[in-house]
Amino acid sequence: MRAPFSRKLWTVTAMEFRLTAANRTFAIITLIGPFLIAALSVLPTLLSMKGSTAERSIVIVGGDQALTAQVAAALAPSNIRVAITSEPESHLDARVIAGELYGYVVLPANLLEAESVAFVSSATGDWQTAGVLQSVIGSAVVSLRLVRAGIEPGAVGSLLRQPRVEARRITKEGGKEQQDFVTALFAGLSFTFLLYMTVLLYGQAIGRSVVVEKTSKTVEIMLSSVRPRELLFGKILGKASAGLLQYAVWIVMAVAVLKLLGPVVKVDLPIVGGARTMVALVAFFLMAFFLYSSAYAALGAASEDEQHMGQLSWPLIVFLVVPMVFIGAIVQSPDGAVTVALSIFPLTAPIVMFQRIALGNPPVWHVVLSVGLTLLTIVGVVLLSARIFRVGILMTGKRAKLREVLRWVSYR
């Protein structure tokens, strides 16, 4: 006599949880995972920022001596070491090619009337150095023009001084908090990579587990005592429980690190680790997990081996990669048209809507619509996956195509 559905379901869930969490690999990944994800998401940006602040040797050719000296002094805080030379450009080209110089600036004789100034270097993509040079040289030229127009030299500095813009974000309670773009960028990158990697890895793990049990004929023994739907849901719930345990450890680690190091590195805890962000992280992880893991389980049941599963699962990979491709636009414009569309579309909503919540204050109806559509999609995907799983788990000897797999949904 068959045991109740719930009883066998929780038996499979507990077994899957033990297989996932009760091993050394899971413990190691849980401990070092946040650091690896932070390194993958933040380290490239930090390295590029560090490279942009490295000292560069640049020479200035032509122009007024007083002006070039003023430019050299203004560039000193930017780690750009400037010298004045009268060498011909052909010699300077050779020095740049040989690596002796980073580049050189050619100031025309009629600098006050000039529309542009040439900056020659071997790094064509270094827009940051070009921007610093444009700002400093432009300010120096404007200052000289004002002096020649009859304004007192001492008053020029105060006339050209610009106020600093401090970005502040208004909260739902009506308060205002200082917004640090770099902190927001790092938080967005880290949390996005965290969601992306965990959903992808757990989804693929479920798919591979189903493929291994199918090819080893273990599933035939299991199906003699449990129904296909119980096996499918048990695997998903077991992996989800392990994922929640992992997230709980990561959240505790993140809060502890930010509490200890936050005052030292000046990281704003409410932005990157506040309660609202952590609750949203767990909620959207669960939605993304059930959405993609159920689909991966169905594709694993329809696959003959792991290579075949990889071929069938490319549509899932595409929808997971889309938020990563648009991450720059999402961070810079959380309420832009493309971002809003991606945050409502169910297959990209869990990652993109979480980013919007972590980085800003999206309208409540956006969040409700996104969550509602995603939950409806999860129910539909789970039901469809259960039908595919039931048919495909015992089918062997033929590689089914994606179109054929979708036809299995109509089987009774």
Image (cartoon, helix red, strand yellow):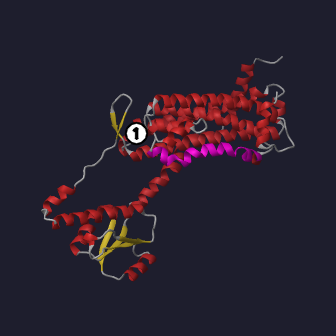
Percent coordinates x, y for residue 88 in the rendering: 35, 83
The answer to whether 23 appears left or right of 364 in the picture is right
Kind of residue sitting beneath label 1: Leu
Please report the residue visible at 72 percent of the width from the left and 47 percent of the height from the top: 310
- Looking at the image, which is closer to me, 77 or 320? 320
Is residue 248 positioned above or below 139 on the image?
Answer: above
For image coordinates 75% across by 39% down, the residue present is: 300
> Is the residue 39 above or below the residue 86 in the image?
above
Please provide percent x and percent y for residue 296. 70, 38
The residue located at (84%, 32%) in the rendering is 220
According to the picture, the residue beneath numbered tag 1 turns out to be 260
Name the image quarter holding the C terminus. Answer: top right
Residue depicted at x 85% and y 44%? 398
Residue 304 lies in magenta, yes or no?
no
Instruction: Single out the residue that lies furthest toward the right.
Output: 397
Relative depth, front residue between 106 and 12? 106
- Label 1 neighbour load within 10 Å: few <14, some 14-19, many 20+: few
The quadrant of the picture occupied by the N terminus is: top right
> Looking at the magenta stretch, what is its main secondary structure?
helix
Residue 228 seen in the figure: yes
> How many marks do you count on the picture?
1
Relative to 256, 228 lies left or right:
right
Write down the region rendered in magenta: 308-332
Helix, strand or loop under label 1: helix
Q: Does residue 315 show up magenta in the picture?
A: yes
Measured as percent of width and height from the top left, residue 360 is found at 43, 37
Q: In the image, 76: left or right of 53?
A: left
